[in-house]
Amino acid sequence: MTKRVHLHVGTPKTGTSYLQHVLFHNQKLLRQKGISYPVDRFDAHFLAALDLMRMPWGGLEAQAIGSWDRLAASVRGFDGSAIISHEILATASRAQIGRALESLGHGRDAEVHVVLSVRDLVRQIPAEWQENVKHRAGLSYGAFLDQIQDPRREGRIPTWFWGVQEVPDILDRWGHDLPPEHVHVVTVPPAGGSPDLLWKRFVEAFGLDGIDLQLDGERVNPSLGAAETTLIRRINRAANEELEPAYYRPLVRELLAHQTLSRRTRTPRLALPPDVHPWATGLEESWIAEIQRRGYDVIGDLDDLRGAPAVADYADPDHPDESLVSGAAVDALKAVLLDHAHLQRRLEQAEAELGDAQRSLEKAYLRPTYRWRHKAVRRLESSGAGRSVMRVYRRARGRSSRSA
């Protein structure tokens, strides 16, 4: 029987983290229902995508070697359908996509369906700059906007942005060898709608109807306000040369951005500048027309790709309200102090436990029986016959360490 493989290839900031969280934590139940989400760690599909595209990513590409082939073999070996999901797959070239489809059994014993979740550019553009900032970027919002609007699209930032955001091009690359009914476009509802609506659309796209999945404990990628993003960008510019990458993620991205500053929800949100708004909405209209023309399966409403009107009170992160940035800085400093205090308490506790263990060990060394045993073992180890006796003794005790 032909199996169905759902390849979810993006785009970023469209509920992908939550979707992957739910699939990861419901693996066993999904397999019982004949659906494989083949992962041995949460970022397994990310590593597989890096491997497929030979993409450098801060050294992680070394860990990724062979990941795609193992993933594809797992899919082929499972007697049922499968789901693969990661948003960086959106940037894959036609050659890489051809390799991916071939390795999954496309055209033989697998029916491949491509799923692309999409959101309006009015929200995606500021979200993409913010993600750059949360990954150590120091580029201003104005410079970012200038680069992505440049028709030449040259350089790292425009290449990445349009690789993961230009919806018709992504659909063309991933869907060129598939019938349009096997290409599914999931639209993200407008802000302020039902929080369950996007999940219901994912359920339809991946054939999860009727499966009682555990949806709590969601993993999210929270957004920051304009002032909070400005603060992180300033930290990047001040600390990047001295703060090693291994420490940046837990300290800046997780502790400061996600766990602390994302909770400041009453400050102005990051938005698209009013003068850029017409350019973005013009692109949205052209994309909607192209998707309609191609006849893809749309799950949701293409009107969702029309962004909200330009904001009346635009908060420019390049020229922020400094009182709001100062407030964010105080919250960030408080978080760092509390985290340091927590680590200090843990260190003191560990030192106390180590001291107790050392004192107990010293007492053991002072016991006559220990000194006698230690002396006897040293004498036996000094001769070949004695070492043979010790090996027999250790085997009898079921221990192989030299302290036995």
Image (tube, rainbow, N blue to C red):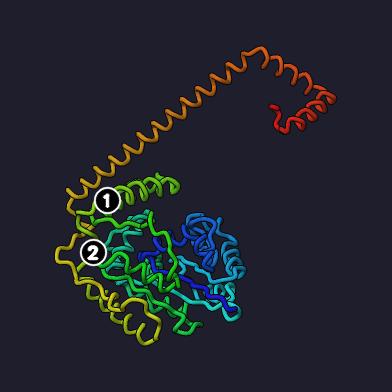
Is residue 53 in view? no
Foreground mark, 2 or 1, reads 1
If the image is split into quadrants, where does the N terminus sit?
Answer: bottom right
Q: Given the image, on which type of amino acid does mark 1 rest?
A: Arg
Residue corresponding to mark 2: 271
Q: Residue at x 39, y 31 (%)?
A: 345
**Residue projecting furthest to the right:** 385
Choose between 239 and 216: the one closer to the eye. Answer: 216
Tell me the element at label 1.
Answer: helix
Q: Residue 231, can we see it?
A: yes
User: Which mark is on residue 361?
Assistant: none
Left or right: residue 225 versus residue 82 is left
Residue 263 numbered tag? 1
Residue type at mark 2 is Ala
Nearest to the observer: residue 17 or residue 243 = 17
On screen, residue 361 versus residue 398, left or right, reads left
Where the C terminus falls, by quadrant?
top right
| Cα distance between the residues tagged 2 and 1 | 18 Å
Q: Relative to 81, say whether 25 is above or below.
A: above
Mark 1: give few (<14), some (14-19) or many (20+) Cα within 10 Å.
few
In this view, the residue in front, 183 or 249, is 183
- Secondary structure type for disc 2: loop
* Quadrant of the rendered image containing residue 187: bottom left
> For this view, does 103 lie left or right of residue 322?
right
- Residue 349 higher or lower than 194, as above or below: above
* Residue 214 placement: quadrant: bottom left
Rendering coords of residue 58 (x, y %): 48, 55
Residue count near mark 2 (Cα–Cα under 10 Å), binned few <14, some 14–19, many ≥20? many
Q: Are marks 2 and 1 in contact (CB under 8 Å)?
A: no
Instruction: Please give the name of the residue rendered at 36% of the width and 77% of the height, measured from the top-left corner.
Output: 299
Q: Name the quadrant containing residue 372.
A: top right
Give the x, y percent position of residue 148.
32, 69
